[in-house]
Image (cartoon, grey):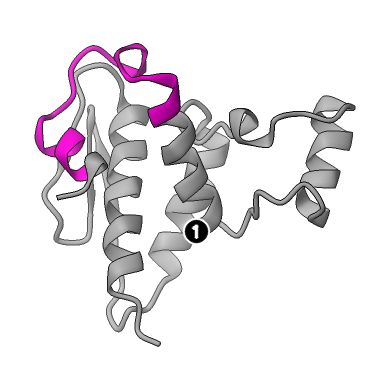
């Protein structure tokens, strides 16, 4: 069982503040890779991100906002729902729960976005292990 799968199965309490900053960065990096946002400082995406958002060089990984921005995480939810693997996946968000496909729902007492973020990480870990070449 992966680190994030263990976090999910334990049904984290207390919100993101209870998670270590490194856990957030690692989760966001995993999502960024799935989302096609390569963490290479020479990539066109990062150069544009730095210029438009921060107007300065930065530590890219700490700038990812999938854990705290609905705009960021919902783009990934849309991508998941558009996959055909060979089936489709529906993302259901309700109260502080999120369920992707037939996976066990993720519940988070702290916030709805954290439940979605954790469910997305669980899905991406599964997806990466089960990609069809």
**How many discs appear?**
1
Of residues 115 and 28, the one nearer the viewer is 28
Residue at the (21%, 26%) spot, across then down: 108
Q: Is residue 123 above or below residue 49?
A: below
Residue 89 visible: no
Residue 15 placed where, x, y %?
29, 16
Q: Which residues are magenta?
A: 5-23
Q: Secondary structure at mark 1?
A: helix
- x%, y% of residue 67? 45, 30
Given residues 117 and 27, the one toward you in this image is 27
Q: Would residue 109 be found to the left or right of residue 77 on screen?
A: left
Q: Position of residue 84 (x, y in %)?
A: 37, 78
Judging by the rendered image, the residue that carries numbered circle 1 is: 34
Q: Residue 19's spot in the image, x, y percent?
A: 32, 20
Task: Look at 57% across and 37% down and name the residue there.
Answer: 71
The residue furthest bottom is 133
Q: Quadrant of the C terminus?
A: bottom left
Residue 126 forms part of the magenta stretch = no
- Residue for point 49% across, 58% down: 34
With 28 as the anchor, is 38 left or right in this view? right
**Where 18 sits versus 130, above or below?**
above
Look at the picture and state if 101 lies above or below 104: below
Q: Give the image quarter of residue 4.
A: top left
Residue 132 shows in the view? yes
Residue drawn 34% across the image and 47% down it? 121
10 Å crowding of disc 1: few (<14), some (14-19), many (20+) = some
């Amino acid at each position: 069982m992966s680190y994030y799968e263990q976090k999910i199965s334990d049904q984290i309490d207390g919100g993101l503040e209870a998670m270590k900053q490194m856990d957030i960065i690692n989760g966001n990096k995993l999502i960024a890779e799935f989302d096609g946002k390569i963490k290479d400082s020479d990539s066109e995406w990062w150069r544009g991100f730095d210029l438009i958002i921060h107007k300065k060089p930065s530590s890219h990984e700490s700038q990812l906002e999938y854990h705290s921005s609905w705009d960021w995480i919902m783009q990934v939810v849309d991508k998941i729902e558009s996959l055909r693997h060979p089936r489709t996946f529906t993302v259901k968000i309700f109260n502080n729960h999120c369920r992707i496909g037939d996976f066990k729902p993720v519940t988070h007492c702290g916030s709805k976005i954290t439940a979605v973020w954790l469910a997305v990480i669980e899905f991406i870990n599964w997806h990466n292990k089960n990609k069809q070449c």
